Image (cartoon, grey):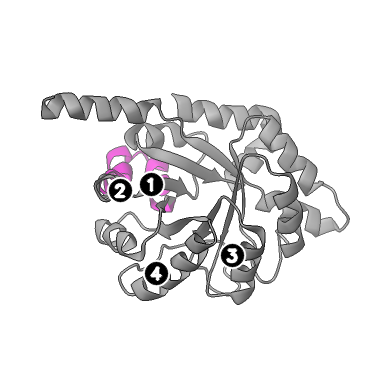
């Protein structure tokens, strides 16, 4: 088999892989918490989101429990039938204990600071390599797939490989900002390079942050080995106008285009 023929079949193989949609339900928890009580019912919402076609449920509990509460994670573990992904900062022992107690399909390590509004950068996988190696080994020994949040920088992807992680999650805020002002090539080029390096190193690729109905298809088309996207804020905002079932299916359609 020639090199070009082999490359063709590799690309065809990846095109046949369906990128999974994991819905982050933090915003539903924020709405519930703002009024007290249990409306919306987070557990029922997760069941419905799976029934509507999502291939995963993501939560990102923070120590102040301003959206997802630690108790929610235990309840969700009981009912999620697709992939359960818990994101968070492993420097918090309470987060580590929560993940080990629930053994989700995947843990995504995100370098959030205290009281941070939302995730805004990836790990420095070079400076934090030894620490990340220790934490990733802990989770992998518990049978949990690991992913770490990284910026679209080739050196950070190379550093991620050294940590032993199974996957990286590409932080896509810069992509979304450039895409929104029409700089499509500038928006995607760093991600293409980062994904190519991840492919070369045998790392799985996830992505998330500010992906939406406008920019998701272009991103997925240019990262053919994309395994999973985690989307919350934009999807829940769209659901206000379009309905939750319809919105989940629209996002899945973006990944199939």
Question: In the rendered image, which residue does mark 1 sit on?
Answer: 204
Specify which label sits upstream in the sequence, 3 or 1.
Answer: 3
Residue 7 in sight: yes
Please report the bounds of the magenta region as a residue range.
Answer: 173-193
Task: Depth check: give the residue in front, 242 or 168.
Answer: 168
How far separated are the C-alphas under marks 3 and 1? 27 Å
Nearer the viewer's eye, disc 3 or disc 1? 1
How far separated are the C-alphas under marks 2 and 4? 17 Å
The quadrant holding residue 81 is top right
Secondary structure of the magenta portion, mostly?
helix
Residue sitting at 86 percent across and 58 percent down? Answer: 36
Furthest toward the left, the residue is 2
Helix, strand or loop at label 3? It is loop
Q: Which mark is residue 202?
A: 2
Question: In the rendered image, which residue does mark 4 sit on?
Answer: 133
How far separated are the C-alphas under marks 1 and 2? 7 Å
Specify which label sits upstream in the sequence, 2 or 4.
Answer: 4
Residue 175 located left or right of residue 30: left
Question: In the rendered image, which residue does mark 3 sit on?
Answer: 117
Alpha-carbon neighbours of circle 4 within 10 Å: few (<14), some, or many (≥20)? some
């Amino acid at each position: 088999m020639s090199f070009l023929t082999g490359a063709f079949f590799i690309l065809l193989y990846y095109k046949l892989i369906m990128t999974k949609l994991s819905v982050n339900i933090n915003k539903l928890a924020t709405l519930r918490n703002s009024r007290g009580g249990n409306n919306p019912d987070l557990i029922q919402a997760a069941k419905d989101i799976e029934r509507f076609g999502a291939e995963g449920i993501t939560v990102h509990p923070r120590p102040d429990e301003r959206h997802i509460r630690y108790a929610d994670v235990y309840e969700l573990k009981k009912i999620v039938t697709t992939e359960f992904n818990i994101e968070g900062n492993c420097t918090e022992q309470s987060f580590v204990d929560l993940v080990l107690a629930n053994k989700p399909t995947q843990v995504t390590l995100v370098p959030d600071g205290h009281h941070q509004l939302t995730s805004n950068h990836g790990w420095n996988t070079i400076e934090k390599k030894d620490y990340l190696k220790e934490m990733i080994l802990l989770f992998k020994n518990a049978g949990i797939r690991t992913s770490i949040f990284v910026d679209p920088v080739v050196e950070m992807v190379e550093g991620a490989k050294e940590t032993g992680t199974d996957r990286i999650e590409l932080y896509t805020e810069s992509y979304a900002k450039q895409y929104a002002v029409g700089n499509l090539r500038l928006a995607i080029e760093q991600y293409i390079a980062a994904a190519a390096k991840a492919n070369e190193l045998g790392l799985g690729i996830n992505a998330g942050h500010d992906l939406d109905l406008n920019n998701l298809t272009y991103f997925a088309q240019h990262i053919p080995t994309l395994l999973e996207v985690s989307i919350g804020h934009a999807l829940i905002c769209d659901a206000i106008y379009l309905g939750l079932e319809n919105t989940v299916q629209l996002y899945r359609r973006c990944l199939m285009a």
